[in-house]
Image: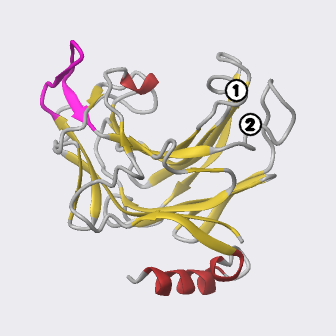
Amino acid sequence: MNLLIYTHILGVIWGNIINLQEDWQLVWHDEFDGDQLDYTKWGIEVNALGGGNNELQLYTDYPSNVRVESGNLILEAWSNSPSLMGTKRKYSSGRIRTKNRGDWKYCYLEVKAKLPAGRGMWPAIWMLPTDDKYGTWPLSGEIDIVELDGAQPNRAHGTIHYGDKWPHNQSSGKEFILEKGSFSDTYHIFAIRWEKDLIRWYIDGECYHTQTRWNTSSAPFPAPFDQRFHLVLNLAVGGNMVDDPDSSTQFPQQMLIDYVRVYQRK
């Protein structure tokens, strides 16, 4: 759909919730219409660190794991026993970010995506602080726009992380359950509205959670969510939030992103 037409329609649909047409302006976007990733907007993360969450994959820059094709960004997980930096694991996948290419303080951000289903799949659309103004995680915060356990593909989670150093860190959020089908059946629009004193989560235009309280041991409210954040898109295999894949898990698995759009107040 033409971006200008879409923006007008969305402003009408959302009415008093958020009027993109009158109150907000598009400041950054990627429609993934070409045949390669736009490196002025994205960096590919290559590492064998398990994402800091005991994930089982290696993140690579191979086209099999990260590519743009048929109007989509494709993050694809394989069970192919890859080797990287002297580390060998059973799985490979993709993770990209906008750090120092797209960084925002307060915005309305939406991603249209189709998420994978299957035990051990952990797709995530989330944000991390660019400058870590208040210290390392979670002192400077984390915003999870959506995460999903592939074994429960009709349940999405929106969360923020904050507070004191681990193990005294805190998190809060809410689960959204689809009444019919799953998030792997078709594309859905996942969004946040992030302002100075609130963060709201939306799925397909429905606001399902509002957060107005958080903290960090390093500074007063509204810290840590008063600094620049960047976007991260990844498809993890295994890890702290999900079980490991088993014989029922089919590979390869795909996370498809149709577009990313970021608006800020005029």
Question: On screen, 106 above or below 98?
Answer: below
**Secondary structure under the numbered disc 1 in the rendered image:** loop
Q: Is 126 on the left or on the right of 64, as rendered?
A: right
Q: Quadrant of residue 188?
A: bottom left
Residue 234 visible here: no
Question: On screen, 219 above or below 37?
Answer: above
Spot occupied by residue 95 in the image (x, y as percentages of width and height): 35, 40
Q: Residue at point 55% right, 55% down? A: 176
Pointers 2 and 1 in contact (CB under 8 A)?
yes
Residue 75 visible here: yes
Instruction: Count up the numbered dots.
Output: 2
Which image quadrant: the N terminus?
bottom left
Spot occupied by residue 54 in the image (x, y as percentages of width and height): 40, 21
Spot occupied by residue 145 in the image (x, y as percentages of width and height): 55, 50
Q: Is residue 91 magenta?
A: yes
Q: Which amino acid, mark 1?
A: Leu
Q: Nearer the viewer, residue 143 or 253?
A: 143
**Secondary structure under the numbered disc 2 in the rendered image:** loop
Q: What numbered label is drawn on residue 139?
A: 1
Q: Which residues are magenta?
A: 79-93
Q: Which amino acid, mark 2?
A: Pro
Q: Residue at point 38% right, 59% down? A: 183
As drawn, the residue found furthest toward the front would be 40
Spot occupied by residue 98 in the image (x, y as percentages of width and height): 47, 46
Q: Which residue is mark 2?
A: 224
Q: Is residue 157 magenta?
A: no
Q: Nearer the viewer, residue 47 or 126?
A: 47
Mark-to-mark CA distance, 2 and 1: 7 Å
Q: Residue at point 47% right, 52% down? A: 155
Q: Nearer the viewer, residue 7 or 242?
A: 7
Q: Is 59 on the left or on the right of 7, as rendered?
A: left
Q: Is 133 on the left or on the right of 116, as rendered?
A: right
